Image: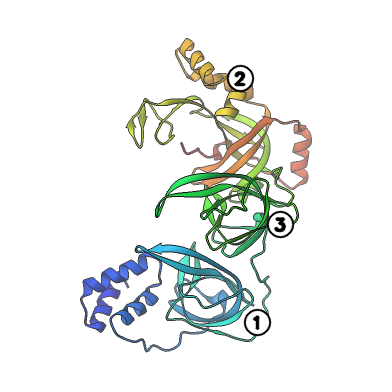
C-alpha cells in the first residue's frame, strides 16, 4: 500500500479529514517510524484504541524488514542514550543491540523502558523498520516490554570493544583509548554556533576519528581515557566515534598504548575491508593521473576549477595549489593515492611559487605534472593514509609518502607465498572526488 492508501484507510476508519491524516502520517514515516506504528499512534491521537491481536513471536534471525510488528524475547547487549531533534522538539532515545540464540538485532526505544545491558526481556508489538539495509526493532508506546528470567546467548554483554571492531551503526559502545589529536571547532549547529571537539583516537588495534558534540574536559591531547555510551557513524568512508552529552568520559590510571603505526596490508586486503582510517600499503607507482601538478581551487569550497569555473560557485578567482593523483599497484590490486599540498611539494622539490614560476616560463602548467612523473613513475613507494571506497574505486588520501626500502623480488615472493595469484588492474583504481 502507498502512503496515500494508508491515509485513506485511516481517514475512513476514524472519520477525519484525509489530508490532515496524510500530513501527520508523512511526518512520522519521514522520520523512519514504521508505518504500522505510525498508524497506531494516529489512531490514538484521533481517539480510537487499537484492538488488534498480539503480534507473532519470532526468533531474531527470522525477523525481516517486511514485518510490521513482532514479539521478541532476548537479552539486551548494549544500551546507548542520545538526543535528537524531531519537528522542532528535542527527544531522548535509547538504542543498542538485543540478542537471542539465533542472532542479534539493533533496536531504538522511543520511550525509557529502563533497560540495562544484561537484562532479559520480552518485547510484545515491537515495530520493525529497515536501517542500513537490515531490520531494526522500534520500541514505542505500542510496545509492551517486560523483564523475564535470564536468557543465555552466545554473545558478549556490554559495549566494551576496540577501535578496529567498530562499524557504522554501533551504539552504546565503551572504549579505552588515547587521544592522539584534538582540536576545538565552531560549527553551525541546530541551535546556532556550537563548539565541538574533533580529532583522532588510538588503541592497540588502530586509530579512528572522533567528534565530541558536548565537549568533555577530559578529552585532551595524549590523555588516556575511557569513553562509555558512544555511537558510531560513517565519516568519509570510515567509522567515526561520536561522543554526546549522555556519554561519560573518565581518565584512566594507565596509559593506553598503540596507534603510532598503521597496519601494513596488501592493497587487495585494504580495499576488501571497505575503507580504513589509517593503513599503509607498498606498491609500484604506475602512473600520475590527469589533474595532478599545479591546479586551481575554488576559494569558497576548495573544489578544483576548470578555466576559472567552479561547479558550485561559477566564475571565481581561483587559488593555486599542488596535488598528485597516482596509481599504485602491488600485484594484488591498485589504488589511487592522493597527495596534498605539502607531500606534493616534497615530491616536486618546490613549493607553489616554484611551480607557478615553472609554468610561467614554459607557458604550460602541465610542466609541473611532467616533472613529477619523471621522478616517481616506475618506482616503489610506501603510502600511508585514509582509504575510502566509492562508486569510482579506491582512493588513499596520503598522510605519508616515501620510497620503499622493500626488495621488490622478496615482496613478490611474499605475495605468492600468501596465495595471491592475480595481478592488479591499474584501470580499477578509482577517480578521486575533487
The residues tagged by marks 3 and 2 sit, at their Cα atoms, a distance apart of 45 Å
Query: For this view, does 23 lie left or right of residue 286?
Result: left
> Comparing marks 3 and 2, which lies closer to the viewer?
3
Q: Which type of secondary structure does the marked residue at label 3 adopt?
A: loop
In this figure, which residue is indicated by the disc labeled 3?
252
In this figure, which residue is indicated by the disc labeled 1?
151
Quick check: marks 1 and 3 in contact, CB under 8 Å? no
In this figure, which residue is indicated by the disc labeled 2?
349
Examine the rendered structure and indicate whether residue 332 appears above or below residue 158.
above
Q: Which type of secondary structure does the marked residue at label 1 adopt?
A: loop
The residue closer to the viewer here, 302 or 80, is 80
Q: Which type of secondary structure does the marked residue at label 2 adopt?
A: loop
Q: Identify the residue at horizontal 51%, vertical 46% (top origin).
A: 390
Mark 2 Cα within 10 Å, few/some/many (few <14, many 20+)? few
Examine the rendered structure and indicate whether residue 421 appears above or below residue 246.
above
Q: Does residue 331 show up? A: no
Residue 108 is situated, as x and y percent measured from the top left of the image, at: 49, 70
Examine the rendered structure and indicate whether residue 137 appears above or below residue 408.
below
* Residue 352, disc: none
Residue 256 is situated, as x and y percent measured from the top left of the image, at: 73, 52
Lower sequence index among marks 1 and 3: 1
Image-quadrant location for residue 331 = top right
Residue 358 is situated, as x and y percent measured from the top left of the image, at: 51, 14
The residues tagged by marks 1 and 2 sit, at their Cα atoms, a distance apart of 65 Å
Amino acid at each position: 500500500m502507498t502512503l496515500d492508501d494508508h491515509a485513506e484507510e485511516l481517514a475512513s476508519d476514524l472519520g477525519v479529514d484525509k489530508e490532515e491524516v496524510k500530513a501527520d502520517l508523512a511526518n512520522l514515516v519521514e522520520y523512519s517510524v514504521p508505518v504500522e506504528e505510525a498508524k497506531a499512534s494516529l489512531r490514538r491521537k484521533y481517539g480510537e484504541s487499537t484492538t488488534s491481536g498480539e503480534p507473532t513471536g519470532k526468533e531474531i534471525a527470522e525477523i525481516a524488514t517486511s514485518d510490521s510488528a513482532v514479539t521478541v524475547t532476548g537479552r539486551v547487549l548494549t544500551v546507548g542514550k542520545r538526543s535528537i531533534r524531531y519537528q522542532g522538539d528535542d527527544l531522548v532515545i535509547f538504542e543498542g543491540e538485543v540478542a537471542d540464540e539465533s542472532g542479534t538485532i539493533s533496536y531504538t526505544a522511543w520511550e525509557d523502558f529502563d533497560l540495562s545491558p544484561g537484562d532479559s526481556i520480552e518485547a510484545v508489538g515491537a515495530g520493525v523498520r529497515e536501517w542500513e539495509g537490515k531490520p531494526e526493532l522500534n520500541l514505542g508506546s505500542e510496545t509492551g516490554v517486560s523483564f523475564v528470567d535470564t536468557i543465555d546467548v552466545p554473545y558478549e554483554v556490554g559495549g566494551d570493544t576496540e577501535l578496529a571492531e567498530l562499524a557504522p551503526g554501533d551504539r552504546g559502545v565503551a572504549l579505552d583509548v588515547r587521544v592522539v589529536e584534538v582540536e576545538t571547532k565552531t560549527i553551525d549547529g541546530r541551535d546556532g554556533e556550537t563548539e565541538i571537539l574533533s580529532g583522532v583516537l588510538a588503541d592497540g588495534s588502530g586509530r579512528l576519528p572522533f567528534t565530541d558534540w558536548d565537549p568533555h574536559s577530559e578529552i585532551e591531547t595524549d590523555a588516556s581515557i575511557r569513553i562509555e555510551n558512544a555511537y558510531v557513524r560513517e565519516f568519509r568512508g570510515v567509522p567515526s566515534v561520536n561522543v554526546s552529552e549522555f556519554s561519560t568520559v573518565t581518565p584512566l590510571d594507565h596509559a593506553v598504548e598503540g596507534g603510532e603505526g598503521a597496519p601494513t596490508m596488501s592493497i587487495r586486503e585494504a580495499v576488501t575491508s571497505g575503507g580504513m582510517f589509517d593503513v599503509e600499503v607498498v606498491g609500484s607507482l604506475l602512473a600520475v593521473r590527469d589533474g595532478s601538478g599545479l591546479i586551481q581551487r575554488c576559494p569558497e569550497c576548495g573544489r578544483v576549477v576548470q578555466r576559472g569555473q567552479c561547479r558550485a560557485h561559477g566564475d571565481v578567482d581561483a587559488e593555486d595549489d599542488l596535488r598528485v593523483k597516482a596509481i599504485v599497484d602491488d600485484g594484488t590490486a591498485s589504488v589511487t593515492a592522493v597527495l596534498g599540498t605539502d607531500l606534493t611539494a616534497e615530491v616536486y622539490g618546490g613549493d607553489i611559487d616554484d611551480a607557478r614560476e615553472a609554468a610561467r616560463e614554459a607557458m604550460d602548467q602541465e610542466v609541473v605534472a611532467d616533472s613529477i612523473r619523471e621522478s616517481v613513475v616506475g618506482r616503489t613507494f610506501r603510502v600511508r593514509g585514509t582509504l575510502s571506497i566509492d562508486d569510482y574505486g579506491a582512493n588513499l588520501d596520503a598522510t605519508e609518502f616515501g620510497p620503499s626500502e622493500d626488495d621488490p623480488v622478496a615482496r613478490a615472493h611474499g605475495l605468492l607465498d600468501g596465495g595471491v595469484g592475480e595481478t592488479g588492474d591499474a584501470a580499477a583504481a578509482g577517480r578521486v572526488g575533487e
